[in-house]
Each structure stands twice: as structure tokens, then as C-alpha cells.
Amino acid sequence: MREVILPVAVIGAGPFGVSTAAYLRSRGVEFRIFGSPMHRWRTQMPAGMFLKSEGFASNLADPIGRCTLQQFCNEEALPYEDARVSLETFTRYAVSFQQRLVPMVEDVLVTMLDRQTHGFRLRLATGEEVRAKKVVVATGLSHAEYIPAELAKLPAELLSHSSDHHHLDRFTGREVLVIGSGQSALETAALLNEAQAKVTLLVRRGSIEWHGVPTPGPRSLWQRLRRPASPMGNGLKVWLCAAAPTAFYHLPEQIRVDVVRTYGERRGTRLEVLGPSGSWWLKERVVGRVPILLGHGVREAEAKGSKVGLRVDGPDGASRHLTADHVIAATGYRYNVGSLPFLGPRLISELRCVQEAPSLSPSFESSIPGLYFAGIASAYNFGPVMRFLCGTDYAARRISSDIARQQSRSRSSVSAGLASARNRTAC
């Protein structure tokens, strides 16, 4: 019996995986998609949070353009506020998007992916094995949580990442130290404070960057030219990163890496795009309500019984000691292809990488033919827009277009071969 090889397998059912699958389906490409739909959004992000991206920038990639967040809110009679999108509203929208456009998602994990002569072999948690000619890896932020080395040795009961908590009320009455200065750190601190935790915010930088309150009414031509608006925010550099991922791809590799690392990690460099910052509506929930230690960096951290002891360096260079019941590292994400548990060492060794992330073609294809990566995995190639929901459209279009084109070319070659064989037989 001849083995059936699936044209495409998509690993991951978050925003990038579902968006890519929606485009594949619209192009008539057969596929199977594996993963728990919107798992991180449904089970890991803190209840009560709001998205950093505005409403118009929080759409998933729909080939027809009808399944937008605003349209969903209108259909469900939900309030739509472009400035702030609640986690609950977005999650309901994303799940609805998946059910309408990609209802065939299989809620099962891929436990192994290996390369074979004519494609790839996948093993599912159910024990089933699947053969596929092409694979799209769209696992999002899973396995990319970054914990600084100074904290990494702390036991799990004393240390967590900001992405680990769907509910923060477990910390009510406890002393919690939040480390970071971006949206995740600031909102985690606000939610902890509102849950009656004794929270302190530790910020390495000397100040916190807050977005300005949007100016009501139309912007002048000068304002639009000087600081053009984009789904990622206002400013020429930000607009370029959001609007021109193809141009970003053709920048020298080191510049691309520096821009992406500058985004979300530090400010004050000439390549700065977006450093750690907080939304304007969050400021009143943090400033004056949560103790903030500015200019403090962690030097050492150790378990002291049921508590954490930290030695931190202050802005004057002097050290001080802090204790807490728990530390939450809101320190962002760094993609490392080696951290994906389903990738075998042989396949990883064959991947050409940039700073531990796959080096990709203009169509998101890796150095292993037929293996594609989307989402944060592609940020060093296409820019920080791939960390945002607004990046789903570009990625889904390019990946699905490339796969459909190759599939069409393959069919044409087979048809030409059959025609040639028939002609020889006739002769």
C-alpha cells in the first residue's frame, strides 16, 4: 500500500499558525494543523489585562478581510474601543476567527519532527505518525520565555515568568518583586497591586517610558509626515518596520539583529525602534500606587528558606539587599530554535541560524527546504513586526503564496511528464 504524504502540516494554532492556515485554505492547499487553539491567550496571559496593540492593529490575517476584531464586536454586541482591547474580547475574537476560518484544527501536540528523503515525519501525542512534504512551525512565544542568568537558578516556587500567570490573585497578601520596565512588567505590577499583593517594581533603567495620550481629532500633515502612524505605534522608524518587512529583510544581518534586540530590551542606541515602554492608560494604575526602584539591576539571587534574597546594584553603584516571597521576571522573550522540544538534534544541526533563530528566505523558508517558520522565530529576518499581531498578514501571505506556487509548479511538471510518456507510448 502506497504511503500518503500530506502536502503541508502546520504546527501551532495561535495567531500566526491559524492565519497561515486560513490563507492556505483560501488557496486550495491541503493541510493539517496541530495545536491547542489560542492556548496562550486562553490560559496563560493575565486575566484583566489589555493588549498593547490598538484595535485596528489586533486583527488576524483573513484572506477576505471580513473577520476583523471590529466586525466581531459588532456582531456580538461587544463594546469596541480602538485605544484599548481587553484580553477577554480579543480571545473571544481569536477563537471565533479560528472556528470560522480554520475549523479543522486538531487539538493535539506534535512531539517529534524529523526530516526524511521526501519531506518530514511528525509524531503526535496520540501516537499517530504523519508524513508531510512541507511543515510550517508557528509555535509563537511558547518555549521563548527569557529569564536572566542571575535569576535562573531560583526554584520554580520562588521564580516565574510573567507569562506563567493567568490569575494573579494567588499572590494576595504576599510580597512580590516584578522585574522589568515594559508593558508586561508594568501591567503585571498593576494587576498584582489591584489583587492586594505587596508588589515592588524593579527597573534597570533610570526611568520608565510612557506612551503619550493620543491627541483627539485629525493630525496635521506635518504631524503625519514627522511621526507617521503604524500598527506598532507612531514614528518613522516604527512605521518603516511595520510597513516594509521586505525592505527590512534586505538590510545587513547585524543591523537586523541589533534593531530587533533593541526593540523590547534597551533604549538610547542609534538603532532604537521601540524600547520597553508602557501604554498611556496604564500609567495612573502604576505611578504613585506601586513602589518603583529605578536604576536597579539584579546582581545575585538565592533562595532563603521560603523567600528570595536578592542583591541589587542601585543607580549610585551601591548594593542593597531585598527579600520577597516570589519574583516575577517580566523580561520578555528570546527565540531559540533549540528550545523547541519536538525538534530533534539532527534537524537542529542542519538549520542555518541567526542568533539561535532560523535564517529564512524571503518566503519564510529555512535552510532546510520545505520547513518554514513564522512569528517571533522570524523577527531577525523580517523585523519586530513579527512580534505583533499585525505581522500575521505579511507572514501568512508570503508562506501560503510560496507553498501554493511550488505546488502548482510540481503539478505542472507531473502533467508534462505524463504527457511526454503518453506521446512516447503513442509513437
Image (tube, rainbow, N blue to C red):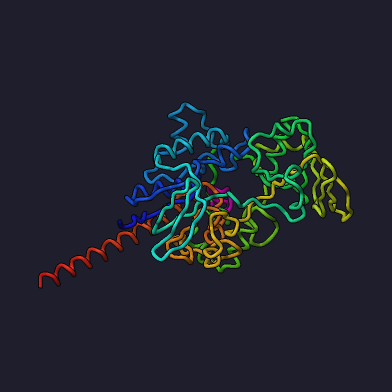
Q: In this view, does 280 lie above or below 400?
A: above
Image coords of residue 55 (percent x, y): 52, 39
Return the residue found at the far front.
Answer: 1
Residue under the image location 36 percent in, 47 percent down: 25
Image coords of residue 226 (percent x, y): 57, 53
Q: Quadrant of residue 72?
A: top left
Is residue 229 shown in magenta?
yes
Return the residue found at the far top.
Answer: 77
Q: Is residue 403 above or below residue 393?
A: below
Q: In this view, does 108 lie above or below 366?
A: above
Task: Please state if 54 lies on the left or on the right of 321 as rendered.
Answer: left
Q: In this view, does 162 lie above or below 358?
A: above
Pick the residue in front: 336 or 274.
Answer: 336
Pick the residue in front: 274 or 343.
Answer: 343
Tell me where the magenta segment starts and ends, as one range: 225-235
Return the residue found at the far left.
Answer: 427
Image coords of residue 131 (percent x, y): 40, 56
Image coords of residue 273 (percent x, y): 62, 56
Residue under the image location 50 percent in, 51 percent down: 138
Is residue 234 shown in magenta?
yes
Residue under the image location 34 percent in, 61 percent down: 406
**Viewer can see residue 15:** no
**Viewer can see residue 98:** yes
- Name the quarter where the N terminus is drawn: bottom left
- Name the quarter where the C terminus is drawn: bottom left
Task: Please state if 114 lies on the left or on the right of 166 as rendered.
Answer: left
Pick the residue in front: 381 or 2.
Answer: 2
